[in-house]
Amino acid sequence: MFYFSKKFDINKTKKNSMDKKIIILFMLFLPLTSLFSQTQTTHIKRIYTNPQGKVYINKELPLYFKLSIKPDTKSDKYLLKSKDNPQYTNPTYFTTEGLNTVYSPSAVDTTTHQTIMPKQNVYFQIYVDGTAPVTATKNNSTPYEKNKDTIFFGVDLEMKLPATDNVAGVEKTYYSIDGEAFKEYNAPLKFPTEKSYVLKYYSVDFVGNREDVKELKFTIDATKPLTNLKINGDYINNIISGTATISLKQEDAFAGSRKTYYVLDKNTEQVYINPITASSITEGEHTLTYKTVDNVQNEEESKAYNFFVDKTAPIVVDEILGDSFFANGKEYSSGRTKLKLTAIDNRAGVKSIYYSINNAEYLLYDKPFSLPLQTGNISVKYYAVDNVNNKTVVDTKNKLLFYSYMDLSGPELSHGFVGQTYKMHDTTYINKETKIVLKATDSEAGLKNITYSLDFASEQDYNEPFSVSGNGLHTIDINGYDNVNNSNQISTFFKVDETGPEIFTTFSVAATKTKNNSKVYPPQLKIYLSAQDKTVGVDKIYYSLNNSVEMLATATITNFIAGENILKIRAIDLLGNESRTEIVFHIE
């Protein structure tokens, strides 16, 4: 209940009734109650005075104008009636939204009771509000709309309910989750459990206008996606053929997978689109790291697949069993002579060997076979297939011909490296992870085996690439033997470097003091990084300041924080050897 009153002299008022019109107003409304449901709060339509003294009234409330000669609420009040329009009063309704005014046609001095000249109106402001607030939803996450009726959010969702009202202002906002009773909204809503939710909400203003209940249905997805790796093509264990492909299939229970990322060895991260082809990957050891992120940013833990790409076919050697001898430059054999075929594959392993005698149909080799009883030259072709279907190419180097020939030369020998190498002048440098590969070929009798001696130690058989540790110079003596025991020998040397660079830091200014066993520097400090490698030279220097993402050091380091700073430095030489150091200092 609000009223306006004005003291005045009754006799004087009667005397000057023709000169002045004094209107004293009293407004009375009857409360109306809105009961929305059993779970909603009751909101009363009312009059509201804000802290600045502005009076707001609900547009639906009835108004009564009364006169009073005293300011207190218990004084007598006289209901005003309209002689000309009685049908529109008692009650009266305001229909204009916003500011409405009631006024006296002339202002009177409250002490002298004299009309203020020149005449001026006295206004009483009333703000009418018949419009409910508008409530929206605002969240800290980008929703994913899987279809028209399904919206997903991540588990870190915080939902805000901002509301606006153009006249009286928003008094309170209410919300209900999954059919519970409505509660007053005071802070962002959180939804830590993975499930579907129904959020209902509305707001009410200071004069009791209530917004229609709004509803938002959504699902919280806290499940990380899953990536399944599949090899398409020939493979055995973790060895795959050069013709195979690697597929990464996404699975996600709710919001659906958005993207799959992968990194091959130490290359740049890429988005998976099509299967990865082994033909585009070099032969040797590799690591594929991969993960999937779903549509609400749930991220799978990275997985790693270690594999070997095998593009090399088996090596096939032959061996004569039984009677054979040389005379007059020709090899002679008896009817008891047999031919043994042996295939060597140092990765996937041999699956089968095939042979053809005198260009006839190829047969599966399972044991030594007899040579045909015929005069003249006898030719035998053969090839082998490994367990990932690499096949020996059949050519003149892969067929055995019996004719007048004496094999007096040993295998041709060579060597190579798989992994990090660096060539300086006539010396090759490797690290302790670099593999040494020994190679031998024999176009006549065929290769039997390879042996080697490292640093003048005992001779041993070569079966697969090997690595050497220990800084400094190393020497390998390589021996190759063919199937008639001809041999050849070569020697080579290389240097092993397994030590990372030495890291140096230069401070642009001197320390001002020591604090907590670390030095203190002024804010203008700059740090210069450098490194020196005694063998092959420095490749890159990285640093991380105060646990930030590691960066390549290309310029001066500045922008230190006040207080303690932690600088982590990592240097890598041209062979991939690395060294690390950490510096703790203060800025004041």
Image: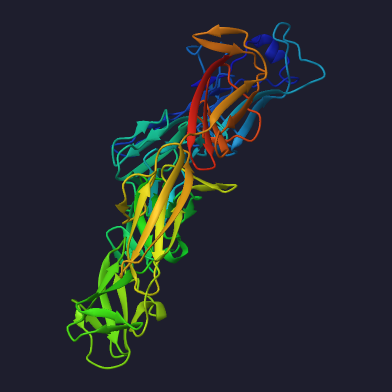
- Look at the image and tell me whether residue 354 can be seen: yes
Measured along the vertical axis of the image, is residue 535 above or below residue 367? above
Viewer-closest of 291 and 46: 291
Q: Residue furthest bottom?
A: 375
Measured along the vertical axis of the image, is residue 513 above or below residue 265? above
Measured along the vertical axis of the image, is residue 311 above or below residue 521? below
Would residue 106 be found to the left or right of residue 362 on screen? right
Residue 177: x and y in percent read 32, 39
Would residue 95 be found to the left or right of residue 435 on screen? right
Please state the total of marks drawn on the protein image.
0
Viewer-closest of 411 and 534: 411
| Res. 369 image quadrant | bottom left
- Look at the image and tell me whether residue 41 can be seen: no
Would residue 193 be found to the left or right of residue 139 on screen? left
| Res. 10 image quadrant | top right
Q: Residue furthest right?
A: 118
Residue at left 34%, top 85%?
403
Viewer-closest of 417 and 241: 417
Q: Which of the image's four quarters has the C terminus?
A: top right
Residue at left 35%, top 66%?
486
Measured along the vertical axis of the image, is residue 402 above or below residue 23? below
Would residue 562 be found to the left or right of residue 47 on screen? right
Residue 522: x and y in percent read 64, 13
Residue 525: x and y in percent read 65, 19
Viewer-closest of 89 and 482: 482
